Amino acid sequence: MSGVNFIVREPLLDPSQRVVGFQLSWQGDAKKAEPDVETLSALMGFVAEQLNDENQQSKIADSTIFLEAVPGLLQAEGIRKLCPQNTVLIFSKRYFADAESLAAIKELRGLGFGVCLKNADVTALERSFFSLISHIEVQLDPANIAKQAKVYAALKQSNVQMVARNVATWADFEACAALGLSSFVGKLHLTPRPTTAQKGLNSAQATILQLMEMIRKNADIQQLETVVKRDAALAYKLLRYINSAGFGLRTEVQSLKHAVTILGYSPLYRWLTLLLATASSSGSSPVLLETAILRGRFAELLGQAFMSKTEAENLFVAGMFSLLDRLIGLPMQEVLSTIQLPDAVVEALISRSGPYGPCLALAEACELNSMLVLSMAESLKISPEDVNRAHLSALVWAKNVTKA
């Protein structure tokens, strides 16, 4: 993979807040021009290698990947490696005015790729374009919803799916959802969503915290089993996570004792961290939970290159806890007062410092499209290719786990 290009992502939510896709963008050296066709081809080939299995089928078939494209990619090798069924190529409207570019777009559509049109005035869109595109980007205007609703109602009569940009608030998202639009939400999912749900720990989370504390103190397995048996649903979900494709065990774990025998206490702690987040009753958006899982796994994979297995697992815990305050609806200091975490994990959570802070900060930067990604990776001596590989591997892992 040529050049200094880091993959950054933005989640796509459907009207019911499910994460149905991601736009993967390339963040390069700010001093250099946009990637050329050769570089774009290499980047797309890399994405395909990471997201496809040995049979060239997508590992995240339930998610759509959006990628910026240019017509010149038609003849490039990289684009041929992508799975057309769940890949949408984004083209600017200017390409539709050029006969040669339009022919290339038609051919890509014929190969099964989705095509998303951007920078177009939807009120003046030629009907002939509808057969060439699967998606169209629209810019939400919260001040003029009624007029937009008429336009979008007409578009809904076609097979073209509408995706909104510039969705800055949850009120904007609700407006998009009412109009039947999916939305690229940028950093919005990290903003607390107004909710009437009770904040704080519920009974399941209190039980999970008790188990985490017992594991930290190396309590006897019989004691752990006694606590788990109080909540059959909790025990069931814990075993489902441990047996999920995200862990890749060859033998199905039948009980907590069996899990400890196979995995030991340390990995069990990380699964309880995951369970703590999923047991939230605060009404958080599903995208927030998926982001926490992805961030934790991403940070863990970044650390595996130069840390011990136990330290890398602590990075997973740090990544999950970094969003636990928003998942539970409590301030971070209050969350941290409920459980004893290693000092290094607390340092990472509070100030992104200590041994775990830099990996957590880098994982976070890639989801926020921060311009500090390059400098952070250089300080950790991690190559762009290794960062991108960890990022896409974490994305696949998180998708598998959230299906468990």
Image: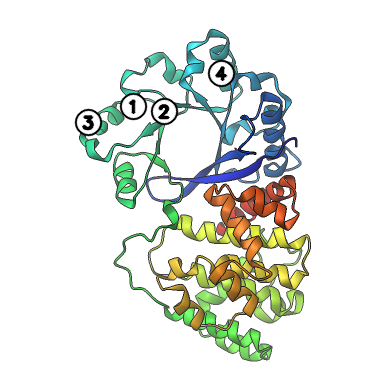
Q: Neighbour class for label 3 at 10 Å: few (<14), some, many (≥20)?
A: few
Q: Earlier in the sequence, mark 4 or mark 1?
A: 4
Q: Which label number is shown at residue 155? A: 1
Task: Give amino acid for label 4.
Answer: Ile
Q: Name the residue under label 4.
A: 105
| Residue depicted at x 38% and y 61% | 192
Task: Give amino acid for label 3.
Answer: Lys
Q: Name the residue under label 3.
A: 147
Q: Label 1 vs label 2: CA separation? A: 7 Å
Q: Label 3 vs label 2: CA separation? A: 19 Å
Question: Please, which residue is most extreme toward the front here?
Answer: 31
Task: Give amino acid for label 2.
Answer: Val
Image-quadrant location for residue 83: top right
* Quadrant for the C terminus in the image: bottom right
Q: What element carries label 4?
A: helix
Q: What element carries label 3?
A: helix
Q: Which of marks 2 and 4 is nearer the N terminus?
A: 4
Asked whether disc 1 touches disc 3, contact meaning CB atoms under 8 Å apart, the reply is: no
Task: Give amino acid for label 1.
Answer: Leu
Foreground disc of the pair 2, 4: 4
Image-quadrant location for residue 347: bottom right
Nearest the camera: 24 or 256? 24
Q: Label 2 vs label 4: CA separation? A: 16 Å
| Residue depicted at x 70% and y 30% | 39
Q: Mark 2 points at which residue?
A: 160
Nearest the camera: 159 or 38? 38
Q: Earlier in the sequence, mark 1 or mark 2?
A: 1
Q: What element carries label 1?
A: helix
In the rendered structure, the answer to whether residue 114 lies left or right of residue 358 reads left
Q: Which of marks 3 and 4 is nearer the N terminus?
A: 4
Q: Neighbour class for label 4 at 10 Å: few (<14), some, many (≥20)?
A: many
